[in-house]
Image: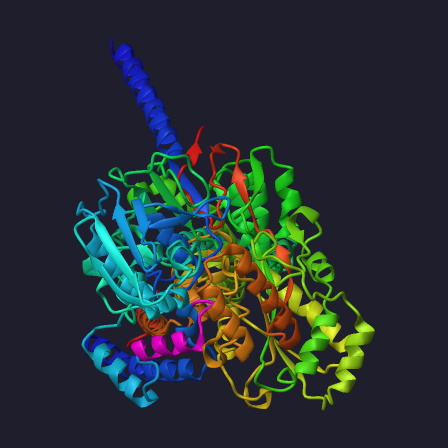
Amino acid sequence: MRRTKSLKLLAATAIAALLLQTGIAAAQSNVLRIRPFGDLKGIDPVTNSDYMARNHGYMIYDTLFAMDDKLQIKPQMLEKYETSADGLTWTFTLRDGLAFHDKQPVTSADVVASLKRWGQRDGLGQQLFANTASLEAVDAKTTRLVLKQKWGLVLDAMGKPSSGVPFIMPERIAKIPATESLTDPVGSGPFIMKKDEWVPGSKVVYVKNPDYKSRGDAASGLAGAKQANVDRVEWLYMPDAQTALNALQAGEIDIFEEVPPDMLTLLSKNRKVKVAPQDSLGVQVVFRMNSIQPPFNNPKIREAIRYMVDQNVFMRAYVDIPALYKDCPSFYMCSSPYYTDAGWVKQDLAKARQLVKESGYDGTPVVVLHGTEAGITNTFSSVAEQLMRDIGLKVDSQAMDWGTLTARRTSKKPTSEGGWSLFISAPTGADMMDPLGHLGLRSNCDSSWFGWPCDEQIEKMRTEFAVTPDLAKRQEIAKALQLRANEVVPYVPLGQLHLVRGVSTSLTDIPKAAIPVYWNIKKTN
Amino acid sequence: MTGYLVRRLLATIPVLGLVAVFVFLLLQMTPGDPAVVIAGDYATTQQVEAIRQQLGLDRPMLEQLMAWLGRLAQGDLGVSIFSRLPVTNLIAQRIEPTLVLTLFTVVLSIAFALPLGVLAAYRAGSWVDRAVMGFAVLGFSTPVFVVGFLLVYVFALGLEWFPTQGYVPLAEGLFGSLRSLTLPAITLALLYAALLARVTRASMLEVLAEDYVRTAHAKGLAPQPVLVGHALKNAAVPIVTVVGVGIAALLGGVVVTETVFNIPGLGRLTADAIMRRDYPVVQGLILLFAGVYVVINLLVDLSYMLFDPRIRL
């Protein structure tokens, strides 16, 4: 009798354990675990231009417009939009049923407040508002924008995919000054941030937004349908790439962003893992010179750098898989509609040496802010240093962590007083597509990116580009601008790279977009 | 005794005050700027300047120091420059993994090192002694990341007995939590046990040469009671000191091990905060570590009385 009872108890325990295991397995299949390329340091994508803040923005917010996989700007939160015949008045109508995570409906008042906050910080947003006569809520669903003069980039600004994305947030949050960081992560996107589970430096948790109203049309890039097909997304930040690789191979995470190229061979041997591009555009590696201090304040030396560079040499030092890099003889991404190879020169070290000699170079060392943490920056800096020595420049390579590099490059002082001459960086392709949004071509002196190139002609062409609606004419301007950039050399592109992510084969329907996003992904056991 | 305790506790206040000022000044002198880290890689100089102003980083250093000390006096450690979360919350999130890992490591180390150290001293000069000392040298000289990755390769990726990384909170079950920390604890224990075994051996060798040990043997006592009851108790003072210092060091953060095993502990929080120049977090952590050292030193001093009744405080 006692034995029968014991057996029953044992059987019940075994069944309970089995059910628990099944439950755990089912729960795990609904959790998407990602090792992002960086840590989410702050949650305000307006005050913070960090790419992780942008990616976080795509999780919890929605946008009026979005870029599809053909790089076209399409309505996203909008039912429709109309433009007056003179092109000055734009009317935007929200879709029905849109709601924030706090259950409040999305209204045009939220749209106005969000765009105004974004317009205070983002470069393209500032230009939009400089050309804006009024932006107002007509009724709960309708927003009207009236321009002072015809401006051809309204859609480009509102559908901007990368840094400075015009996310729509509740009016009460968007009214917080753009100099203060937001602390309340309420949006209307497909996922809700669980702020109580956020462990900065370690973990960010999102859960499915059950009230999200997706578009009916097919998903395409960042546009179209957005379905949260998993109940929970966890960003598990692991600073060490080897740890992330181990976790992916053991099935503890589903996605490993920015896999270093030297680890790809290991991944290719694992049948449970595949390798996929991280985004559809890739990055452009840039050789950014300080144009206001010697030696790169000398245009002839900047010109010598153009002849020094062979993109292939730089990229093969970093990765030897041809599919992951591309020679792109242009300041614009090769996938950009403004791509042109006009005025591009081939590597000619003899010519580069000659230009250095002709420049009257006085031996001022090129101070390289050599970031040693990031693989791209480290490798490309090493190649650049050797090539510069080869053409007769004196090089002072200063190894440092990324935090020090980003602080040092704000200095406009001479190199002898803590200033700098060169750093290497790799902005995402979405920020290098056209003359207006282009990070490296901007040449408005103090307002331009670190290095502060100053050129009236380039700025004139950028302004003209902004007010030109016709694509063919814009392409002409972009070409002319490239020719001018080849003369004044605000920076030198070192090629395009495709960053890759390791992905579990249990995942399907991963969006192919300009930015890594996590809606629509399905996970099976 | 009570007077001693009060005096020692009161003495922590100026120690923490000096540490606070020193850390503040040190951080100000360190190259780097949180504003540029917040602004991101592609911000302009003007955007960086706006953030600097908003955070008050453009104010004179003395003004920033006084403001911080004023808040500190009220028990307010401030908020992180980046996440805008209170520093106390950030520290509280990280204490559990570090505490559990520390205790696990210390228990493993003591359980392993004490018998080895005693045995090595008892069999001094024999192959056992040489083997224990060989292990100690190996434990000292093998970098923790090498040990860590080897353990992961064999026991996580190969045998699949343990997870490769991560921490399971105690709230989700003691077994799961200890399982997630087994490999990191062994990694750390290897180093720590090596140190402890050496100290135990050295201390025991000294005690084993004492007259009272010889007398105990002469009385016909078995080796075990002599070693444990007489020798080990008298050799305990330096051993307890090393255990105390080890606990303080482990609580202070073991960045490499936490990074290799992706444990969200205080070590990684410290390293991240330093890399980002998140001044309030660094300052809060250093104060915490200073406090931990003071308290553990006090506890170690008090423990001396337990092992050696001749010691009076």
Farthest residue toward the right? A350
Q: Which residues are magenta?
A: B40-55
Horizontally, is A115 left or right of A376 in the view?
A: left
Horizontally, is A321 left or right of A97 in the view?
A: right
Q: How many marks?
A: 0
Residue at image position (36%, 25%) is A22
Compared to A214, does B258 lie above or below? below
Compared to A331, does A249 lie above or below? above
Q: What colour scheme was applied to this rendering of the protein? A: rainbow
Provide the major secondary structure of the magenta segment.
helix
Q: Quadrant of residue A209?
A: top left
Q: Position of residue A323 (x, y in %)?
A: 67, 46
Residue B167 is at least partly visible in this image: no
Looking at the rendered image, the quarter that the N terminus of chain B falls into is bottom left
Residue at image position (24%, 54%) is A143
Residue at image position (47%, 54%) is B109
Q: Nearer the viewer, residue A58 or A11?
A: A58
Residue at image position (77%, 67%) is A347
Compared to A305, does A250 lie above or below? above
Q: Quadrant of residue A453?
A: bottom right
Magenta includes A476? Answer: no
Compared to B36, does A320 lie above or below? above
Q: Position of residue A458 (x, y in %)?
A: 54, 74
Q: Nearer the viewer, residue A130 or A101?
A: A130
Q: Nearer the viewer, residue B171 or A343?
A: A343
Residue A136 is at least partly visible in this image: yes
Q: Position of residue A421 (x, y in %)?
A: 61, 80
Q: Quadrant of residue A381?
A: bottom right
